[in-house]
Image (spheres, coloured by chain):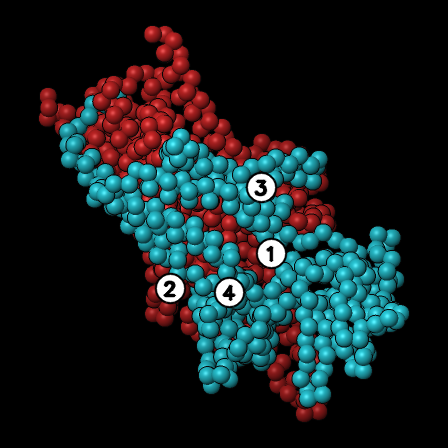
Chain colours: A red, B cyan
Amino acid sequence: MSTLRKLTAWLIPALCLLFIASSFFMATRPSAGFDFKNFGTLPVVSNGRVQPLDSLARNALLSIHGKQNIPGDGAPATSAAWLAELNFKPELADTRKIFVIHHDDLLGLTKLTRGEENSYSYAQLLPSFPALQQEARRIGVADSKTWSPYEKALMLLTRNLTLYNQLKHALALPGQDHLESEFTLFLTDIGGALPEVAKNDRGETFDQTLIDSASSRMEIVREWASMTEVYTTPSGTGADGWRKLPDSLVDAIDQGTFHPSTLDYARMGDAYRSGDSSAFNSAIKDDRAWLSANRPDQLTKSSSESLFNAIAPFYLCMVLYVVAFLCAVVSWLWQGSTLRQAAFRVLLIGLSLHTLGLVTRMMLEGRPPVTNLYSSAIFIGWGAIILSSILEIFHRNAIGTVVASVVGFTTLLIAHHLSLSGDTLEMMRAVLDTNFWLATHVVVITLGYASTFLAGTIAIVYLLLRAFGHVPKSTASSLRGMVYGVICFATLASFVGTVLGGIWADQSWGRFWGWDPKENGALLIVIWNAIILHARWGGMIRERGLMVMAVFGNLVTSWSWFGTNMLGIGLHSYGFTDAAFFWLSVFMISQVLIMALGLIREKLRVNDQ
Amino acid sequence: MQGLKLLSSLRLTVALLGFAMVLIFIATISQVELGIHEVQAKFFRSWIAWWDIMPGEKKVPIPIPGGTLLGSLLVLNLLAAHGARFKFSWSKVGMVVIHSGILLLLLGELFTGLLGREAQMTLNEGQILNYSTFPREVELVVIRPDSDGLETVTAIPQARLKDGAEFPFGGFSVRIQSYFSNSEILAESEATEAFDKTHATEGSGKGYAVLRKPREATDDRKDLTSAFVEIIPDGGKSQGRWLLSNALKGEQSFPAAGWLWKMAIRQRRLYHEFSIKLVDFSHDRYLGTDVPKNFSSKIRILNPDTGENREDLIYMNHPLRYGGLTFYQAGFENNDSTTIFQVVRNPVWTIPYIACAMVGLGLLWVFSQHLIKAISRRNKPTPAP
């Protein structure tokens, strides 16, 4: 019997490992037909950094559409495939319904009727461009804080249309059907016109038509270059040594010949249009071969990033945390130690994957773990899981696993929604460009957030168990010990993190403390933790009071993490902030209700006795 | 005795910290309306803070304990608690270290407020300056050019600039007819009804009208301070009316008592015993974006007293500490040809470093003691709920 139990305790983790392995296998399997997988690995510079086409496509699609799957029959299956279609068959891509419009007034302005998906295509929106531009000009003058929901929605839509257009011009010029021959014509026409220009300079007779045709071609390429901000062609050295595709055509005039990568993109485009997958794949292969000989580091980096995108480790982690949570909760009712062990093992698998994802991001960025709001969410989850795993090892009652999986799942869900606002591996502004302070202040303060949330979550478990069930004395004392210990850690981390932030501010702006909202938010966490500790030492609160106060810590921390950012609305994505405001309010209200539950039920019980 | 007991009680600590949280939270949300400087003065450097619940609407101010009051009570509470209950033991050492560190931190913040100065230096490429200016403070200067090429400068601080204020200079006096702590200046032809009816009769401010405005609250907007000023010879009649403002460039001259004087309203200056020359300012952005990658100022320090003449580089997170001052890269303008330094004098800047180390080590000491106790107590599993 005990062997069977042991087996069961390993069976669920083993299934989870199998699930991960299959995801890895799917991510690395070469694609049949058009090789969009390798197409997605090609490095370009956008948003100031070298990134694979896959990331470019993914982030754009998430910004525009909110998700990666495109509706409609025969729609591209992956974001890289969508990018290929957008550039090489734009007339088809323009019919894909990817622009999301919810606001009725905006639908009215664009004269569209509400469909099932609230999604509309570029072609459907095209007739409304003049009206949209006029509105955007009017709204853009006002302070973004004063925008109404309709105005925000309109600005978001115009921003997404611009993004779409920029991407559309990254790898080809829409309207040119045979890129390779157009490129070659460009070079021969300009080459043919140069002697005529020289003749003109010398005062000899010259052929005006040659000059005219060349300068109109030049004009087209110049115009094209102004339409995109994607740098496709490596030239020179480093991250700055990249050229846009149209600019690489201009460079070819001096060189006398095209950059190999320029021609490869032209061949990809022509092959895609003619449906010739083997020509498409061989152009990609040639480009990768050239890159691996000349830009090996950047090719490796972009290939790893695209693999990282395909595996999506944080998504897998979310699945594992759900499994761990279910096993752990069921273990309280049935098959206690077997399921508890299984749950903890699944949690540890999730933690390893979480760590792998975190480390990969760090290596891709060359930075400490936390560089923006997105990565802070990933790191808070990670820190909380580590701490609660330690608790689980000591207490062995599945509470650590439950709490870890809840915090891990929630923070990864938050991270997913944050990633909708754009590139999560963005470059650091000059003021933040210091690995030392990012590694010390930011990491420590984020651990402070993580541990305060952890204490609050354990307290929620206590209060819910107390309200809807029965808490044995020994469990109560174990929960009390956990909350108290975690609050001690939270006090240390949030205090040291806050003061390190002050020291950083002293180093970069010359003032230790400026009472800025984010600083104040961090200080509130420190003070709240200090209040809990002093109230406990002074005997002002007992077990239940400690728990209720720890839940209030969730409120304080969420204010510091998100609330302070909403005051200034300085965040680049207005669409996100409104949704975040809603969810933050929901979270805060739920915490208040749980605290109330902790206070009320106790009174009832006292009356019962 | 009862009083001392209350003063040293943990209940008071918790209550004061609770009030501190309320204060900090309200001060944070008030920043949206008031701006950071006003909030600091109103909430943190005050005994009682009057909180305006509905800014812009009806005024309903509610008193809450201010930063100074809470800070001093917390210090008293801390001293009383340690004084009343102090008994040496190794386990108490951690607590004493933590609280001394916090005390030091609070005192450091107090001294920074009292002794610290913050100014700015705006330098064009090639320019040499031996002073910084205070961006939120002006002065009225009256300058007498002396025969030997030197100037005698009389600077009147902003606090003394008021409607009707009169400043005697041997032979004449400068009288402020009307003073605008913040204003908008337009050509008379474009001015509306709301503008002040007073006009200048002399100087470069002729033909302009002035509109009174409330002071700017936010960091990135500067007050335009203006005043209509009359020059009145002793026992005589007014020589005319000048419009002075930090919006008008340069000084305006007037003849009085045998000299050609000059006067102006300008940002208050902090003179240094050395000069700084901006050799070169550079600003890189990430390819294809407006995101700044770095900005840096190559400067030359010129100190006639010590004979120093050397180059240095000031950039983000790498300030220059020189002559008791610290120069930070704060901004830039004019198409990347002008740099702006934040110039800070803070003699107590080391205190937070020491305090942080004390509290951090103290907390580590106390909590690891807890941890060791907890681990030795528990090494058996506890039942599930």
- Same-chain check, marks 3 and 4: yes
- Whole-percent x, y for residue B65 in the image: 53, 39
Residue B356, percent across and down?
35, 53
Foreground residue, A478 or A578?
A478
Q: Is residue A238 left or right of residue B68?
A: left
Residue with the mark numbered 3: B49
Q: Are marks 2 and 4 on the same chain?
A: no
Q: Within 10 angstroms of label 3, few (less than 14), some, or many (20 or more) residues?
A: many
Report the Cα–Cα distance between label 3 and label 2: 57 Å
Q: Nearer the viewer, residue A84 or B215?
A: B215
Label 3 vs label 4: CA separation? 28 Å
Tell me the SS state at disc 1: loop
- For badge 3, the amino acid type reads Ala
Write down the residue under mark 4. B344
Chain letter for mark 1, please: B
Q: Earlier in the sequence, mark 1 or mark 4?
A: 1
Q: Classify the position of the N terminus of chain A by image quarter.
A: top left
Identified at 35% across, 57% down, the residue is B354
Please give the residue where the numbered disc 1 appears in the rendered image: B219
Q: Residue at x 38, y 48 (%)?
A: B102
Front tag of 2 and 1:
1
Amino acid at the residue labelled 4: Val
Where's residue A421, x and y in %? 51, 47
Mark 2 to mark 1: distance in Å?
42 Å
Q: Is residue B362 visible to us here?
A: yes
Identified by mark 1, the residue type is Asp
Q: Chain of mark 2?
A: A
What residue is pinned by disc 2?
A298
In three-dimensional space, the C-alpha distance between marks 2 and 4, rounded to whole angstroms, equals 42 Å
